[in-house]
Amino acid sequence: MGRWSRLLAPKLVTFAGVRDKDRVLDVGTGTGSLAFVVESQMPQGRIVGVDPSAAFVAYARSNAKSGSVSFEVG
C-alpha cells in the first residue's frame, strides 16, 4: 500500500473483518503501518509482521508500543 498505508489500513482492517482477540499475520509488513493499525483496533489481539528487509523490520520494531505486535525478518 506504500504511502497510502496509514490512510487505507483502517478501511482494510474493517473490510477484512478482523476482530479483537484475533491473530493476524502481516506478510510484507514493511515499516509496520498496517500492523500498527490492527494493533490499535484490536488491543487484545496478536499481530506478527514479516518482511524480507532487515532495515524495515528494525524500524517497525523500534516503533512497537506493546507486546501484542512483533516483527520478524523472513
Image (cartoon, helix red, strand yellow):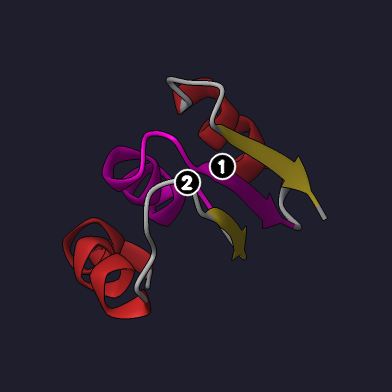
Residue where numbered disc 1 is placed: 46
Q: Nearer the viewer, residue 66 or 34?
A: 66
Mark 1 packing: few (<14 Cα in 10 Å), some, or many (20+)? some
Q: Given the image, on which type of amino acid does mark 2 rest?
A: Lys
Residue 34 lies in the magenta stretch: yes
What residue range appears in magenta? Answer: 30-51
Q: Given the image, on which type of amino acid does mark 1 rest?
A: Arg
Name the spot of residue 4 as percent of width and height, x first.
24, 67
Q: Considering only vertical position in the picture, is 1 above or below 60? A: below
Q: Considering only vertical position in the picture, is 22 above or below 63? A: below
Q: Considering only vertical position in the picture, is 9 above or below 17? A: above
Which secondary structure lies at badge 2?
A: loop
Query: Residue at coordinates 16% horizontally, 62% vertically from top-left?
Result: 7
> Which one is earlier in the sequence, the residue at label 1 or at label 2?
2
Q: Nearer the viewer, residue 17 or 4?
A: 17
Mark 2 packing: few (<14 Cα in 10 Å), some, or many (20+)? few
Residue where numbered disc 2 is placed: 21
Q: Quadrant of residue 44?
A: top left
Q: What is the quadrant of the N terminus in the image?
A: bottom left
Q: Considering only vertical position in the picture, is 11 above or below 39? A: below
Q: Residue furthest bottom?
A: 15
Q: What is the quadrant of the C terminus in the image?
A: bottom right
Q: Quadrant of residue 61?
A: top right
Name the spot of residue 65 as percent of width and height, x first.
42, 20
Q: CA distance from mark 1 to mark 2?
A: 7 Å
